[in-house]
C-alpha cells in the first residue's frame, strides 16, 4: 500500500511539473502573438485542406468503433451493433474533450451497458481491458518513430535544461510492446487463464487493436498536419514532435490535452512555422477535431437518452395496460 501511494505521488508530481512548465511557457510567448498575423495566416490557408481534415476527423471517429467491437468480441459480450456504435462514439468523444479517460469512460460505459442488462462482472472486465487499448498504438508507433524514422531526435522540455535522446523512448516502447505481445502469445499457446493475465487480449485481437490504435493516432496526426502551413517540413519530420506532444498531453490527463499539447507543439515547431502560424493551426485543430465532434456527441447523447426514456415509458404503459 505504501509503495503504491509513493508511485501515485511521484506520478502526480511529474504530471504536475509538466503542466506547470507548459503553462509557464505559454505565458512567456503570449506577448509574441499577433492577432493581425493570425488572421492573415487564416486568409492564406488553403480551405481544401480544412475540408480534408474534416473528412479525416469523421473517418477517425468512425474507426474508434472498432475498439469497442474488438473488446466486446474478445470478452464474448453481445451488444447490439446500433448501441455499440452510439456508445463508442459518445464515450470516445467525451473522453477526448473532457479528459480523465479511464474514469469518465468507465462511468459512461457502466451507465450505458447496465441498461442493456450486461452483467456487472462483464462490464468490469470490459473496462479493465479498455484501460490499455488507446495506448498500444502510441507505444507501437513510438518504436518506429524513435528507432527508425528519426534516430537522433532530441527530446526537450520547455523551461527545463534537461534533454535526452528520443531512442530511449523508442527502446522503452519496444520492451513494453514486446513483453505485452510475448505474454499474449504464451497465454494463447498454453491456454493460460490466470486472473492476472486477463486484461491481455488474444494474439489475434492484440494485432487488430494495435492496427486500429495505430491508425487512430496516424489519422489524428494527419488532421493536424493538414492544418499547418505547407511546404516547410515533411510529414515524417513533423511526426516525432507530434508524438512527444501527444505523449505529454495524454499523460497529463488534462481535458483535450489543452495547454500541454499546445505548449509542446509550439515549443518544437516554432522555429519552422512561427508562433502565430502554429497558434492558428491549433485553433483550427481544436475546432475541427474536438469542438465540432463534441457538439455532435452531445446531440447524439441527448437523442440516445431521449430514446431510452421513451422506451421506459412505453414499457410502463404496457405494464399498466396489462394489469388493467
Image (spheres, rainbow, N blue to C red):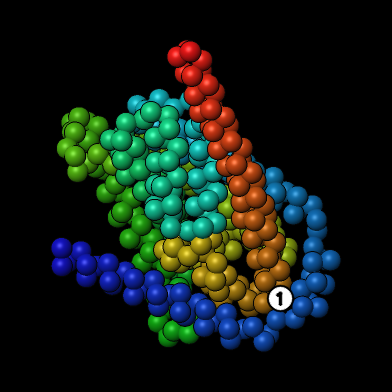
In the rendered structure, the answer to whether residue 222 lies left or right of residue 166 reads right
Q: Identify the residue shown where x is 30% and y is 38%.
A: 125
In the image, 183 versus 280, the foreground residue is 280
Please provide percent x and percent y for residue 20.
45, 79
**Is 75 situated above or below 102?**
above
In the image, 40 versus 121, the foreground residue is 121
Please provide percent x and percent y for residue 144.
45, 55
State the residue position of label 1: 276
Count of residue discs: 1
Q: Secondary structure at mark 1?
A: helix
Label 1 crowd (10 A; few <14 / some 14-19 / many >=20): many
In the rendered structure, the answer to whether residue 200 lies left or right of residue 48 reads left
In the rendered structure, the answer to whether residue 260 lies left or right of residue 44 reads left
Please provide percent x and percent y for residue 138.
44, 54
Q: Identify the residue shown where x is 57% and y is 70%.
A: 262
Location of the N terminus by quadrant is: bottom left
Please provide percent x and percent y for residue 39.
80, 72
Q: Identify the residue shown where x is 59% and y is 63%.
A: 238
Amino acid at each position: 500500500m505504501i509503495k503504491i501511494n509513493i508511485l501515485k505521488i511521484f506520478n502526480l508530481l511529474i504530471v504536475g511539473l509538466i503542466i506547470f512548465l507548459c503553462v509557464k511557457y505559454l505565458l512567456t510567448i503570449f506577448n509574441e502573438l499577433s492577432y493581425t498575423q493570425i488572421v492573415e495566416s487564416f486568409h492564406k490557408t488553403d480551405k481544401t485542406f480544412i475540408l480534408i481534415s474534416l473528412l479525416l476527423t469523421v473517418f477517425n471517429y468512425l474507426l474508434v468503433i472498432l475498439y469497442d467491437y474488438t473488446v466486446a468480441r474478445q470478452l464474448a459480450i453481445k451488444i447490439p451493433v446500433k448501441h455499440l456504435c452510439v456508445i463508442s462514439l459518445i464515450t470516445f468523444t467525451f473522453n477526448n474533450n473532457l479528459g480523465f479517460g479511464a474514469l469518465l469512460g468507465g462511468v459512461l460505459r457502466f451507465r450505458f451497458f447496465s441498461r442493456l442488462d450486461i452483467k456487472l462482472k462483464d462490464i468490469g472486465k470490459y473496462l479493465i481491458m479498455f484501460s490499455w487499448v488507446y495506448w498500444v498504438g502510441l507505444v507501437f508507433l513510438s518504436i518506429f518513430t524513435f528507432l527508425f524514422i528519426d534516430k537522433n531526435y532530441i527530446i526537450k522540455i520547455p523551461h527545463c535544461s534537461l534533454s535526452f535522446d528520443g531512442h530511449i523512448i523508442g527502446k522503452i516502447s519496444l520492451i513494453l510492446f514486446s513483453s505485452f505481445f510475448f505474454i499474449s502469445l504464451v497465454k494463447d499457446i498454453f491456454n493460460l487463464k490466470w486472473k492476472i493475465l486477463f486484461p491481455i487480449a488474444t494474439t489475434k485481437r492484440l494485432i487488430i487493436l494495435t492496427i486500429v490504435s495505430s491508425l487512430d493516432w496516424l489519422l489524428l496526426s494527419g488532421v493536424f498536419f493538414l492544418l499547418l502551413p505547407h511546404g516547410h517540413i515533411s510529414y515524417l519530420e513533423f511526426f516525432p514532435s507530434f508524438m512527444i506532444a501527444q505523449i505529454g498531453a495524454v499523460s497529463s490527463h488534462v481535458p483535450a490535452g489543452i495547454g500541454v499539447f499546445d505548449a509542446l507543439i509550439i515549443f518544437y515547431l516554432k522555429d519552422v512555422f512561427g508562433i502565430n502560424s502554429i497558434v492558428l493551426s491549433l485553433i483550427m485543430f481544436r475546432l475541427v477535431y474536438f469542438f465540432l465532434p463534441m457538439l455532435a456527441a452531445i446531440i447524439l447523447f441527448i437523442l440516445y437518452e431521449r430514446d431510452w426514456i421513451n422506451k421506459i415509458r412505453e414499457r410502463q404503459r404496457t405494464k399498466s395496460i396489462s394489469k388493467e
